[in-house]
Image: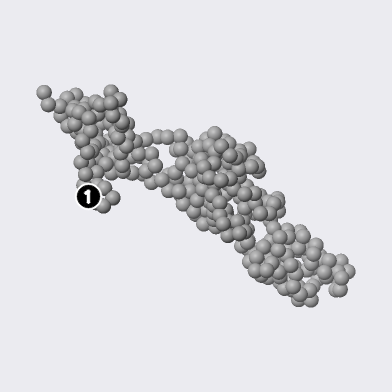
Amino acid sequence: MNTLRKRTSAAAALALLLIVPALPALAGSPEPLGQAQTQAPPLAKPQEPLSAEYRIGAQDLLEISVFGLDALNKTVRVSEDGKIALPLIGEVLVDGMTKSEVERTLSALLKEKYLQDPQVSVFIREYQSKRVSVIGAVRTPGPIDLLGRQSLLQIISQAGGLTNEAGNEILVIRQNKDGTSQTLNISIEELVVKGNPELNIPLAPNDVVSVPIDKMVVIYVFGRVLNPGALECRQSRVPTLLQVIAQAGGFAERASKSKVLIKRVDAKGVPLEIRVNVSQILKNKRPDVRLLPNDVIYVGNAVF
């Protein structure tokens, strides 16, 4: 049987997301979340500003070196309360600091008591505190380090781009400090195809980027149509009866337009048969029929 595939603008969006690095105008866009394009209340602004340099937080692993003082060359993990513990110095609060700020802080503490001109270097070996999670229809789902200011398109690109099962939108879920959460629904077509920079939002630590899966489903058409076969379509965009017949090439000669049969199985597994007079739909005497995945449409012969 011939396979009829429905092509939409969303397919172009998926292809474009695979070349996100080539879209600098979008990737660098820093600004608001937009209003008209959202289907949910706008996300609140990040709880802390997103700077160009990574800010250290709990569970990050730091490698600290002091020139000429091997006793202070340590690899330490930032505690849950944002502190590190070093010989001679003791506990130091580093939460929210950049690498350069930690270096200056440690240098100042060592200069007070031990060294005349301490040379301190800090290397962030593991980024644990500033991450976002990407789930759903992306090629490499999982946590991604949020290094500096990164946009939605940049993070999706790092996750390998969208798969063929991606739907029409991207969900960004943000946790607030009071325990509540907010969700923004972002249209892939608006973001990528139309290039709306307001939707290429900067992400905040602990955001969850979800790309819902919109799997392919099948509707079967056979009988007196020109191209009987299986029609593949997205689950969110199942066509109507007229659309399916049109994509099957239309009615063949001697087709019965008044007795088109739809066979389906309901949610409880009970088989159903629905007879439709398509002639009445064509004359606007009755509404078109919205089909369901796995429906079987049969067009019989006209009786003369």
Q: Secondary structure at mark 1?
A: loop
Q: Which residue is mark 1?
A: 270
Please say which color scheme the image uses.
one colour
Residue 287: percent from the left, percent from the top?
Answer: 31, 31
Residue 156: percent from the left, percent from the top?
Answer: 54, 48
Can residue 166 be seen here? The reply is yes
Picture quarter with the N terminus: top left
Residue 14: percent from the left, percent from the top?
Answer: 48, 41
> What residue is drawn where x is 40% and y is 34%?
7
The quadrant holding residue 244 is top left
Q: Is residue 276 left or right of residue 61?
A: left
Q: Residue furthest left?
A: 304
Q: Amino acid at mark 1?
A: Val
> What residue is drawn where x is 83% and y is 70%?
110
Q: Nearer the viewer, residue 176 or 14?
A: 176
Can residue 145 be seen here? The reply is no
> What residue is drawn where x is 25% and y is 31%?
227
Q: Nearer the viewer, residue 74 or 82?
A: 82
The quadrant holding residue 251 is top left
Tell me if mark 1 has few (under 14), some (14-19) or many (20+) residues whose alpha carbon lies within 10 angstroms of its own: few
Residue 166: percent from the left, percent from the top?
Answer: 44, 45
The quadrant holding residue 298 is top left
Q: Is residue 42 left or right of residue 53?
A: left
